[in-house]
Amino acid sequence: MTLQPARSARSIAASVAAVVAVAAAPAFAQNIAVVNGKAIPTSRADAIVKQVVAQGQQQDSPQLRDLIKQDLISREVMMQEAEKQGYGKSAEVKTALENARQAIVVQALVADYVKKNPAKDADIKAEYDRFVKETGDKEYHVRHILVDTEAQANDIIAKLKGGAKFEDLAKQSKDTGSANNGGDLDWAAPSSFPEVFSNAFVGLQKGQVTQKAVQTPNGFHVIKVDDIRAAKLPTFEEVKPQIEEALTQRKLQAYQEELVKKAKIQ
């Protein structure tokens, strides 16, 4: 009978130890390390792993997690030393920290806004259709000669009518980039040029030359159409991601401008 209380005490002690062990296990799992009493939470490592994997740099693995753990430990050691030496109180560091905090918070706002306000498929398709309409279904291989005055342009047109070769006359062009190449501007859609320039050649047939000088801010042009072909436009699916990104940026710009407009700025 005298041994029973002792057995009970040992049993209770064992039970208490078991409870402490069970309770302590999750606490240890919450941190990957404790540096000079400062815990490094596992969630921080998990976030870095997730980011690295999302960027396609590496696969999640014990080796990756060990590298990240060692890096976080090294950074914590350096951070503690920096704080000990007073760098955290530096005005320059405080400014940098505030700028970083601002960037992170704004990034979170932007990410949430984009998630809640995605570009609609109908809007993306409408933007593609507008692009196709503006680009047109034809591409033109054109040449031009750029001069200072209308009189000079008219003189070139007269010489062309007299049998002179366009490529030879192009050598006097102010456009030094194309002058030595017969005035060649290569294949392009009309939308690639200023409207007044493209309007002058879209009505021409293969081999024809503008019969009047074409004035732009750069001077006066004589334009020749070397050839015409069907435009090679990208399909909707090929450019959908780019259009979606452009529309998203446009939404963000409008959102920012609206917030600035509503803000009280002194």
Image (tube, grey):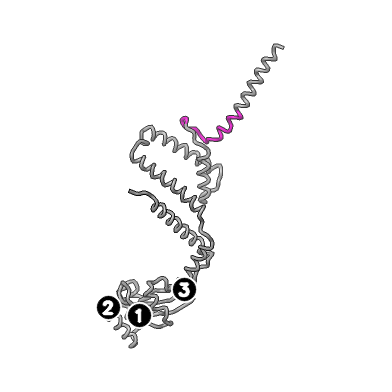
The disc, 3 or 2, on the residue closer to the chain's N-terminal end is: 3
Please state which amino acid type lies under the numbered disc 1. Answer: Glu
Please state which amino acid type lies under the numbered disc 2. Answer: Thr
Callout in the foreground (1, 3): 3
- For the record, the magenta segment spans 21-37
* Residue farthest toward the top in the current orientation of the protein: 2
CA–CA distance between discs 3 and 2? 31 Å
Q: Few, some or many C-alpha atoms within 10 Å of disc 2 (few <14, some 14-19, many ≥20)?
A: few
Where is the N terminus found, in terms of image quarters?
top right
Instruction: Return the residue at label 1.
Output: 167
* Residue farthest toward the right in the current orientation of the protein: 1
Where's residue 88, x and y in %? 37, 36
Instruction: Return the residue at label 2.
Output: 149
Where's residue 26, x and y in %? 58, 33
Vertical side of 173 occupied by 253: above or below: above
Q: Would residue 237 be found to the left or right of residue 258 on screen? A: right
Instruction: Return the residue at label 3.
Output: 136
Q: Nearer the viewer, residue 156 or 56?
A: 156
